[in-house]
Image (spheres, coloured by chain):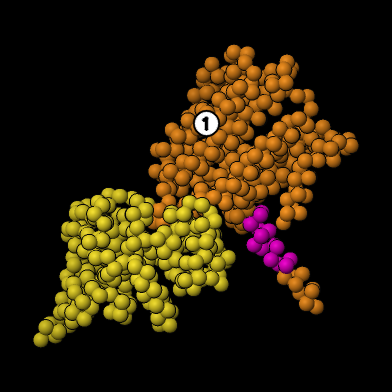
Amino acid sequence: MRRGWLALAAALLFFPWLVAGSNSAAFLQDMGALVLLAAIGASAWNILGGYAGQISVGHAMFYGAGAYLPLLLYQQWHLPPLLGVPLGVGVSLLLALVVGLPTFRLQGHYFSMATIAVAELIRIVVSNWDFLGAAIGLQGPAVSQHWWDLTFRSAVPYYYIFLGVLAVLLLVTWHMQRSRLGYYLRAVRAGERPARSLGVPVRRYKLYALMLSAAFTSLAGSLYALKTGFVDPDSGLGILVSVQLIITAALGGAGTLLGPLLGAAILIPLQTATNTWFGGSGSGLTYIIYGTIIVLIARFEPGGLLDLWHHRVAPRLNKRREGRHAA
Amino acid sequence: MLLSAEKVAKAFGSFKAVASADLHVEAGEIVGLIGPNGAGKSTFFNCIAGDLRPSEGRILFDGVDVTNAPPETHARLGIGRTFQVPATFEDMTILENVMVGAFLRRPKRGAARERALEIIEMTGLGAQAQQRARSLGTPGRKRLEIARVLATEPRLMLLDEALAGLTPGEIQRAMELVREIHRLGVTLVIVEHVMEVILTLARRVLVFNQGHIIASGTPQDVVNDPKVIEAYLGRGHGRQAQR
């Protein structure tokens, strides 16, 4: 087990160097950074959607807050975008409180629908607000003036920044799943009524999960904006942002520590490949892939690929191995 | 008085499921609630457990008014309950299920785990501690529910048909477990269809019919009461019993 963790950590740590000799080194390093970014967003969603089972389809509002604030500070007041990162987290926490308090009275798909409604409302408001760049969006510094602009030509510095944030997020999640909070959230996912009868203050704990999830989703949004140097209502607040967070987590395994990372490691290269192979017309194919994945996960393996591995593939392999030993 | 429910009524629209029911339970008692299907006992039970808010009346637990308190407050005060259809956390292991209950009094993971393991052993689930709850059959699930509630360290335990659907052998083992819980000082209110359980365990029985309590007393008094016989078996049997 420990060996597996070390191998994973080493692979992630040395990935940019391992591909450095390749002809497409820059492309692969950029894809590596995008995989980590997707893993951060999906792991953040996973706290609420995976562990607590509250399927938010409106997490784009937190992602957008994180993406808009750094670029807004830069564009409006020429302040370093980095200052906007904690501001984005603050705004997201506030949003989480405002949205969570009334919507956590709702359960199941009613909660999901409410989150879609709030996120879409925010997207429409931002799309029509000139101060926030309206439909055109906001831009960051084209050329780096200071290191704290976090504007780099190479993807490698982004890769390591994203890796650091992902490591912190996974550590927080690991700690959470071993604590009372983690147990309570899983109990809430399994059944609110029995959880309450055991003394779990369900709404309070759902709110904790939402706030933690919102803070890290906002961070993912900020990192996206700092890397691309641009955000508009669709790329920061569109419903597909939320959908991607969900699919990435669900594909790998919602409610597991490494599921979102696994989902990102599959989905992002797949998305990049379709875009590369089919050019502009390939962007539509991404959504067809998303839809197919949703149907396949829902029908055959709601626990995602990690669940498939742990409960179906690994036991069979173990049986076969034991059989061979016995023979 | 540990539990005092006074003139509790619950209506769903124009339908009155419970009409002015009283229940007083002293600490250390085992009280049985029986009645035909649809008599209102589960609704009354859910009002006591905090799952339903009574339309009228008042419920006091150890002097604290819990009439409109949510279930988590009930649990914190020391009222634990099981469900008619076991509501175990299917994807969690048996140990994790019980730890959820143990966290109520022991916020630290190590202490909660230790307590949960003690209770799992006591309830006879030790061998399956690391299995997922979904792997258990009905008797195991019912035991797990009891274990989970025990982990919250209740003073009053409400058992909602905790022994229904078990074989005679399993019922005997489950009854032994209930006695052991009672020996620990937990007061019990039991809703049960299995008369053997009520007659053996309860010292006092209340009989529900059509939302009303129609009889109360010792198990022997109650089973011989013509009103009870009539409620269970029909009017003819009630008259025969009176003769």
**Side (left or right) of B167 relative to A322:** left
Question: Which residue is at 49% across, 62% downward?
Answer: B115
Q: Position of residue B75 (x, y in %)?
A: 37, 55
- Chain B image colour: yellow
Question: In the rendered structure, which amino acid carries the disc numbered 1?
Answer: Ser
Q: Could you tell me how many numbered marks the image carries?
A: 1
* Residue A313 shown in magenta: yes
Question: Which residue is at 54% across, 32% downward?
Answer: A62
Pointer 1 chain: A
Vertical side of A5 occupied by A315: above or below: below
Camera-side residue of B101 and A52: B101
Residue identified by numbered label 1: A92
Q: Which residues are magenta?
A: A305-318
Instruction: Inspect this view and state whether residue A124 appears.
Output: yes
Q: Position of residue A136 (x, y in %)?
A: 60, 20
Instruction: Inspect this view and state whether residue A139 appears.
Output: no
Quadrant housing residue B84? bottom left
Q: Position of residue A288 (x, y in %)?
A: 65, 43
**Side (left or right) of B170 relative to B78:** right
- As drawn, the chain in orange is A
**Side (left or right) of A93 relative to B52:** right
SS state under label 1: helix
* Residue A235 shown in magenta: no
**Side (left or right) of A324 relative to B65:** right
Q: Residue furthest left?
A: B243
Circle 1 packing at 10 Å, graded few (<14), some (14-19), many (20+), is many
Question: Which residue is at 39% across, 77% downward?
Answer: B176
Question: Which residue is at 24% across, 65% downward?
Answer: B25
Q: Main secondary structure of the magenta part?
A: helix
Q: Position of residue A106 (x, y in %)?
A: 41, 44
Look at the image and tell me in which quarter the N terminus of chain A lies.
bottom right
Look at the image and tell me in which quarter the C terminus of chain A lies.
bottom right
